[in-house]
Amino acid sequence: MIRLQDLSAAIYGAWRLAWVDPRGLAYFDASERGYWQSFWAAVIAAPAYSLIVAINLSGPDYADAPPIDDLRLLSIELIAYVISWTAFPLAMVTVTKMLGREAQYMRYIVAANWGGLLEMTAFLPATAVGETVPALEVLPVLVSVAMFSYEWYIARTALAITSRQALIPVAINFAFGLIIAIIARALILTPT
């Protein structure tokens, strides 16, 4: 279980990074304990993710979808969610070695995980508004662009790498997210 003071510090650190303040890194526990605790961000973000999924499933992309069993839907989305929070940190073990930044790996994953919680918090209202207000349907795309910029800044700052190198983790995270979403959508749309 994560202590409230650790949670508060981590969220504040992620917030400071969102405001392009590198001192936000000082609020993260980059120890092994802090590394594992940073995955609490996935647990805390899960309700927002569930709402985003519900909003998307009620949208026009799924209007012609065959009926899906609730247990199957829950299983698909739960597995996709867990993979999305674990595949990237695993891939970054190799990427940080390639970049010569193994020593910054834990600090980066801690910052990225807590940053992911902030991203989910921002993406939920953007999705809700984008799906319900036709004039603002571009809002989730704009928030996604901001999230890519945020992820880039976290990578550049936490790994202490160049601006160009920071594009690598962002591209990997984007690719993983896209692949996971495509597979989950295909499984949801496939009749049983």
Image (spheres, rainbow, N blue to C red):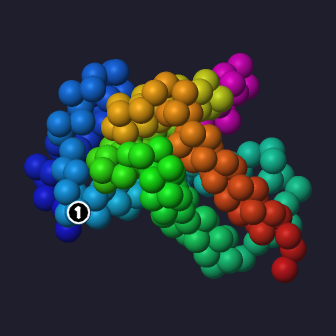
Q: Which picture quadrant has residue 20?
A: top left
Q: Secondary structure at mark 1?
A: helix
Name above or below for residue 36 compared with residue 111.
below
Left or right of residue 40: residue 95: right
| Residue 64 falls inside the magenta stretch | no
Magenta stretch, residue numbers: 125-139
Query: Which of these two is toward me, 35 or 115?
Result: 35
Q: Position of residue 24 (x, y in %)?
A: 24, 31
Q: Position of residue 142 (x, y in %)?
A: 61, 24
- The kind of residue on which mark 1 rests is Glu
Q: Residue at x 84, y 80 (%)?
A: 192
Q: Position of residue 139 (x, y in %)?
A: 62, 25
Name above or below for residue 185 compared with residue 117.
below
Q: Residue at x 20, y 68 (%)?
A: 1
Query: Which of these two is toward me, 118 or 107?
Result: 107
Q: Residue at x 81, y 47 (%)?
A: 61
Residue to which mark 1 is pinned? 32
Query: Which of these two is toward me, 72 or 143?
Result: 143
Q: Is residue 110 visible?
A: no
